[in-house]
């Protein structure tokens, strides 16, 4: 059973993705057809189509789906320690909370910050 607060917190990444997608949709026509694609550091590595701005959203949704599948079935996680029967629920809730925090962090790092220099001018 997934606690209600875990479900509510898991909505935060989707709100971030929706806000980014709506903003991207509103400024998409003003973005040049060819954008700079960065690798590591601040160097311009390559150029690509502005359709690359949608890939972080798709990748983020795939990661969130994977995290949600883990949150739904915490009993399938192979812990490196033995869990006592009376502490299972607490351990599962802590694990689910940690996964939600990771999901929020990943969403913040992937979606809006991916192409900040192109989208947020």
Image (cartoon, rainbow, N blue to C red):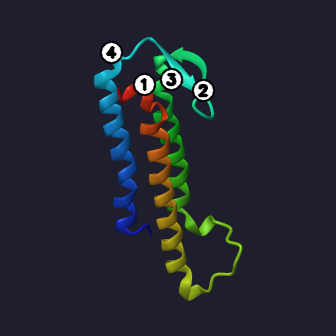
Q: CA distance from mark 3 to mark 1?
A: 11 Å
Label 1 crowd bin: few (<14), some (14–19), many (20+), radius 10 Å: some
Residue to which mark 4 is pinned: 29
Disc 1 and disc 4 in contact, CB within 8 angstroms: no
Q: Residues within 10 Å of mark 2 (few under 14, many from 20)?
A: few
- N-terminal label among 3 and 4: 4
Label 2 to label 3, Cα distance in Å?
Answer: 18 Å
Residue marked by disc 1: 118
Q: Earlier in the sequence, mark 3 or mark 1?
A: 3
Instruction: Write down the quadrant of residue 76 in the picture.
Output: bottom right
Q: Are marks 1 and 2 in contact (CB under 8 Å)?
A: no
State the separation of the CA atoms marked 1 and 2: 14 Å
Q: Please name the residue that numbered disc 3 is placed on.
A: 52
Q: Is residue 38 above or below residue 94?
A: above
Instruction: Name the element at disc 4.
Output: helix
**Residue at (50, 72) in percent of width and height:** 94
Q: Is residue 116 above or below residue 4?
A: above
* Inter-mark Cα distance, 2 to 4: 25 Å
In the rendered structure, the answer to whether residue 120 lies left or right of residue 84 reads left
The reply to whether discs 3 and 1 touch (Cβ–Cβ < 8 Å) is: no
- In this picture, residue 96 sits left or right of residue 78: left
- Nearest the camera: 21 or 65? 21
């Amino acid at each position: 059973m997934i606690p209600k607060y875990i479900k509510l917190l898991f909505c935060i990444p989707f709100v971030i993705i929706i806000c980014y997608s709506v903003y991207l949709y509103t400024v998409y026509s003003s973005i040049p057809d060819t954008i700079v694609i960065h690798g590591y550091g601040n160097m311009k590595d390559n150029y690509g189509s502005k359709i690359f701005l949608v890939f972080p959203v798709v990748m983020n949704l795939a990661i969130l789906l994977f995290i949600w599948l883990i949150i739904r079935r915490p009993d399938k996680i192979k812990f490196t320690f033995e869990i006592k029967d009376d502490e299972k629920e607490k351990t599962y809730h802590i694990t689910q909370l940690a996964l939600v925090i990771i999901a929020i962090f990943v969403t913040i790092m992937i979606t809006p910050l991916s192409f900040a220099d192109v989208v947020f001018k």
